[in-house]
Amino acid sequence: MTALFQWAADLISSLPKGWVVLLAALLKSIVIVLFVILNVMFMVWLERKVSARIQRRIGPNRVGRFGMWQLIADTVKLLGKEDIIPSMVDRWLFVLAPLVVFATSFLIWVVMPLGPNWETPANLNVGVLYLAAVTSFTILGVFMSGWGSNNKYSVVSSMRAAAVMMSYEIPQVLAVMAVAMVAGSLSLTDIVGAQSKVWYILLQPLAFIIFFISSFAELNRTPFDLAEAESELIAGYNVEYSGLRFAFFFLAEYANLLAMSALMATLFLGGWRPLFPLPGPIWFWGPVWFVAKTYFFVLLNMWVKWTLPRIRIDQLMEFCWKFLLPLSLLNIALTGLVVLARV
Amino acid sequence: MTLENEQPVGTSLGSVEDNLSQPGPEPSVREGKKELRDLFADVGEHTEELILNMGPQHPATHGVLRIVLRLNGETIEEAVPDIGYLHRGIEKLAEKWTYPMVLPVIDRMDYLSVATNEFVYAMAVEKLLGVEVPARGQYIRVIMSELSRIASHLIFFATFTLDMGAITPFLYGLREREYIMNLFEMVAGARLTLSYFRVGGVREDVPDGFKEKCLEYCDIQEKMLKEYDQLFTGNRIAVHRMRDLSILPPDVGLGYGASGPTLRASGVAYDVRKSEPYSGYENFDFNVATRTEGDSYARYLVRLDEIGESLKIIRQAVNNLPDGPYMAKVPRVIKPPAGEAVVHIEAPRGDTGVYLVSDGSTNPYRMKWRAPTFNHVSMLPYMLKGYKIADSVIIGGSIDVVLGEVDR
């Protein structure tokens, strides 16, 4: 066994430096993809169970213990469906859109510090700006699907999605800016590093609230799920999709929820930093804390989603531009004053 | 991609607008939109109005109602309801059947409040025959129709909240309705289409233990009404969406022939149970739930209040259920003398009436049904104009349409 490790270590050290970096990045990417996909599968099950409990139902309980294999069964069913591309759609946009939505939901993880010794595949020193950029990719996919579907409901829905997501991007980014100002860095690893004494949810409560509210709009979930408002727009932008293409949209929603929750945990709850020390190495407990904090936000999101009704589009925009945006600007001004006073 | 301005067949989109006097809620905003459109016209761009078909296959139109919407952005410029997708010709079928045979089919009119349908039909035949229903029969009828009213309003609560995107209250509403369905099953053997009323009374007496079960249900429902308030009524998003939405002035409502909670929310305290008491309603102590605002929120609150009032009636009726026969002496073959009868009662959705003509044979010569929601659907062009698409489902939900009754 030792010989095997020795051989592997020798092999790696004999490779050129560039190859090693590439190999490490590749391995990390595989870890990330597996992590996200497994979590998404768990979250789909979790949401069904949580919503069932909120609604005084039992939820899935037929496939496996506690209905744990429900998602596998659903996926097999969706795989078996006929792949329908309606005749009047814009074929390229229609086929590409689910892939865009699904693939971009993984991008956030490239800069996410999962644990204390986790070197992110790309340690960008502008991590926060990168986040702002990749979270807007979802709009592209949603708009492509809505427009490409050539359906009136889808068009209205994608217009709404674009308007809402773009508007809420602004207060969200401004909220993150305040956090970055306190941390003195745009890199997520450094932001977690700066939270060694106090978490930013205490230093930046306003930014947290703004970010939390905006995340609902960004994720298209109730009360801000206007784009897929099933009561008026049926299913919105994905109304023409079926089978596996629909599954991509469905899974992307949860991947985005996971990413957004992880982001909130990183920015405001100190990422992998433990709430109280536990016996054992931090390289083990770090990721556990990180996942626990992420699921705290996931559950919070589900709780809100299954309790509140949906807000109307003009009320939502009014709320963003007349309330959240001034508030986030005020927050930045306050943070700036405090940071200046400390220097 | 082009969105073609398709003209729906058989629907003229110009004529309805001429009949409407209300300019819509925000004339200034609409004017502004027009200016924007002109601006684009100058630079060679053009915008078009979008014709959107809501229904008949749409999750939020409560059945097979089709509304053709002419949209400017998300604002509704014009709405034309199109009915008839659930037409089964019940009125015509009734002419071919004997009086008792019609009764089970009447259940399919307003399928959410079955007992009131049977109630009004049975009363019409009794009026033709000149039969007096014994007191016990009258009280059982009142209990059943009030339970029916609550079941119907619970469905309203459930679907109305669903229209606003809140999925959880939907299941809460249906859960309490289940108690009523169980009570119905206990009494009539059926859960939805009862066929329990008969000409001259009811089919059979209430079983043992019904009284206790019924009172138990009343207590549960009373508690749950508070839960609905906590969950939904006071919710700021919900209130924000319903308040001042599609205000119906009382004179307009009366002009369209509106009735029931839809009219009472506009401040008109018209309730057939009070104005022309029937079947012993004069013996019960209850209030007519009324609001003056006339908006969707008022229509919602009136219905919730009515659940409480119905519970009051049920409690009184169950506790004071008189002894005696539950069925009057009625000839085996019902053959009313030639003549006509008009009877109307207070159904959950409003003033439901039936006009029955007898030619002295065993079949009705003509049956005409007055469905309250038919009038309410005809108000939709007036009520929807100027609001957003997202509001259309709330407004449509707030008048509580049942297409089985509209199309017949």
Image (cartoon, rainbow, N blue to C red):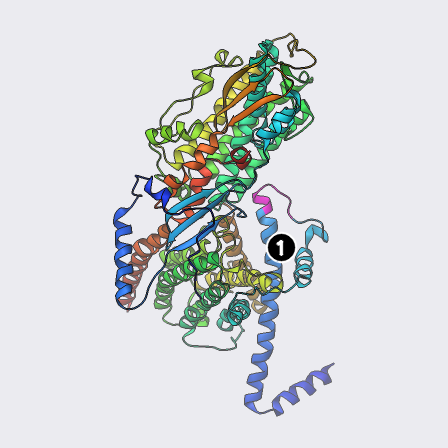
Left or right of residue A95: residue B8:
left
Residue occupying image coordinates x 27% and y 67%: A340
Q: Is residue A57 magenta?
A: yes
Q: For the N terminus of chain B, which image quadrant?
A: bottom left
Give the amino acid at mark 1. Answer: Trp
From the viewer's side, name the closer residue of A90 and A44. A90
Q: Is residue A140 magenta?
A: no
The magenta-colored residue range is: A52-59
Q: How many marks?
A: 1
Image position, residue B308 (x, y; %): 49, 25
Image position, residue B121 (x, y; %): 57, 21
Q: Residue furthest top?
A: B324
Image position, residue B148 (x, y; %): 56, 26
Q: For the C terminus of chain B, which image quadrant?
A: top right
Q: Chain of mark 1?
A: A
Q: Is residue A59 above or below residue B339?
A: below
From the viewer's side, name the closer residue of B343 and B242. B343
Examine the rendering and report whether any part of residue B218 can be seen: no
Q: Residue furthest right?
A: A1
Q: Secondary structure at mark 1?
A: helix
